Amino acid sequence: MKGKRQDMTTMHKLKKNYEFKKVYNKGKYYVEKYVVMYMIPNSSNFNRVGFSASKKVGKSVVRNKIKRRMKEAYRKFADSTKVGFDIVFTARAGSGSADYSKIENNIISILKRAKLKKSEE
């Protein structure tokens, strides 16, 4: 497969509530205007990623839209991200009105501050 595109089916996901709680409670966090990233080492050779948006963000249509935008922004940079972490991206209350470029810039900024990017682009 040339130009293999990584999507959420090949990306390892956090699914269970206890997995999210472990990252929230024991992990380190980084805050931006629209996104918060929680991370904890997972002692494996891949990242497990989860996305969440509380009801403070908006109704279900808005929450799902923001989660899709966060997933796409992470997917674009997943190949240049260090491995071995459980990561949770959480949308903040004002993110419902943010466009894709703002979400993407927040995620890039967080990954750089957390030193998860392999190379500075």
Image: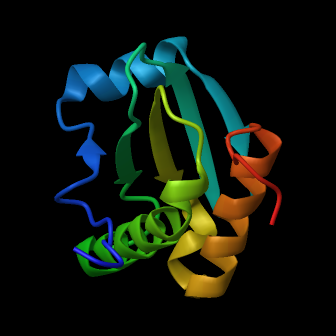
- Report the label total: 0
Is 56 situated above or below 1?
above
Residue 33 in view in this figure: no
Residue 84 in view in this figure: yes
At a point 68% along the width and 40% down the height, the residue shown is 116
Question: 109 or 52, which is in the foreground?
Answer: 109
Is 74 situated above or below 64?
above
Q: Residue 109 lies in what quarter of the image?
A: bottom right
Is 23 situated above or below 59?
above
At a point 19% along the width and 38% down the height, the residue shown is 15
Lateral position of residue 120 relative to residue 35, left or right: right
Residue 8: x and y, percent? 25, 60
At a point 30% along the width and 78% down the height, the residue shown is 2
At a point 41% along the width and 36% down the height, the residue shown is 47
Question: 60 or 99, which is in the foreground?
Answer: 99
Residue 65: x and y, percent? 35, 79
Lateral position of residue 20 relative to residue 114, left or right: left
Residue 77: x and y, percent? 56, 63
Question: 56 or 49, which is in the foreground?
Answer: 49
Q: Residue 121 lies in what quarter of the image?
A: bottom right
Is 83 situated above or below 52?
above
